[in-house]
Amino acid sequence: MRKKIFVIACLTVCVAVLFAADEQPLNVKPGEWQVKYDVKYTGLPPQYQAMVEQMTAQQKSAMGLAAPETSKLCVKAADLNKPWSQDNCRWTVIKSTGSDLEAHSTSCQHGSRSANSDMDVNIKIHAVDSEHVRATLHGTAVMQGSQVTIDGSYLGKWLASTCSAKE
């Protein structure tokens, strides 16, 4: 009986160690990053598409609809094993290694309060080296009967080890 308990305990520890070894933070520098992104929405309901078409370039930019856009992002060491999103998504990390991070969310909020829908989103981040990353994002949602799709591509470049005061 003791031998069986010992074997089970050893297997449990081995599985825990293997799982922890699989979840490594991205091997990139924390600090201030410049991120250039290009995001496209398709399949918006007609009334939302009409609203987007009437927006100014500044309004589209504020919603991430003007492409491509560049922004600065403060990435802390604790952020290196999760998506660097500044949204209200609840992420589940699928894969986290020194060079790649993949995550999934089924609860990204999308749309206005009156037409709110949860978006199913996948993100993949690849560390090219310690100062450069590439990422892709793909998501879908049903919004007022329309299948809405979001696709994004991102290029990140490390700028400094400390973040500017605005971050």
Image: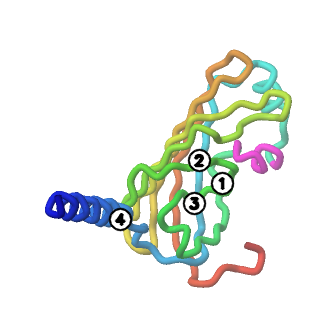
Amino acid type assigned to the residue bearing label 1 in the image: Glu
Please give the residue where the numbered disc 2 appears in the rendered image.
38
Label 4 vs 3, first from the N-terminus: 4
Among the 4 quarters of the image, the one containing residue 4: bottom left
Given residues 164 and 119, the one toward you in this image is 119
In the image shown, does 13 or 105 lie closer to the viewer? 13
Give the structural element (helix, strand or loop) at label 1: strand
User: Circle 3 — which element?
Assistant: loop
Circles 2 and 1, Cβ within 8 Å, touching? The answer is yes
> Could you give the CA–CA distance between mark 2 and mark 1, rounded to whole angstroms?
6 Å
**What is the CA distance from the residue labelled 2 to the residue labelled 4?**
33 Å
- Residue on which the image places disc 4: 20
Q: Quadrant of residue 109?
A: top right
Q: Amino acid at mark 4?
A: Ala
The quarter of the displayed image where residue 148 is located: top right
**Gap in angstroms between the C-alphas marked 1 and 4:** 36 Å
| Amino acid of disc 3 | Trp
Identify the magenta region.
Answer: 58-65
Q: Position of residue 89 (x, y in %)?
A: 64, 47
What residue is at 62 percent from the left and 28 percent from the top? 141
Task: Indicate the quadrant containing the N terminus: top left, top right, bottom left or bottom right.
Answer: bottom left
Q: In this rendering, which labeled residue sits more in front, label 1 or label 4?
A: 4
Q: How did the renderer colour the structure?
A: rainbow
Asked whether, in this view, residue 47 is left or right of residue 136, the answer is right
Q: Main secondary structure of the magenta part?
A: helix
Task: Provide residue 87's location: percent of width, then percent of height.
Answer: 68, 52
Q: Are marks 2 and 3 in contact (CB under 8 Å)?
A: no
Q: Which residue is mark 1?
A: 69
**Disc number at residue 84?**
3
**Mark 2–mark 3 distance (CA, rounded to whole Å):** 16 Å
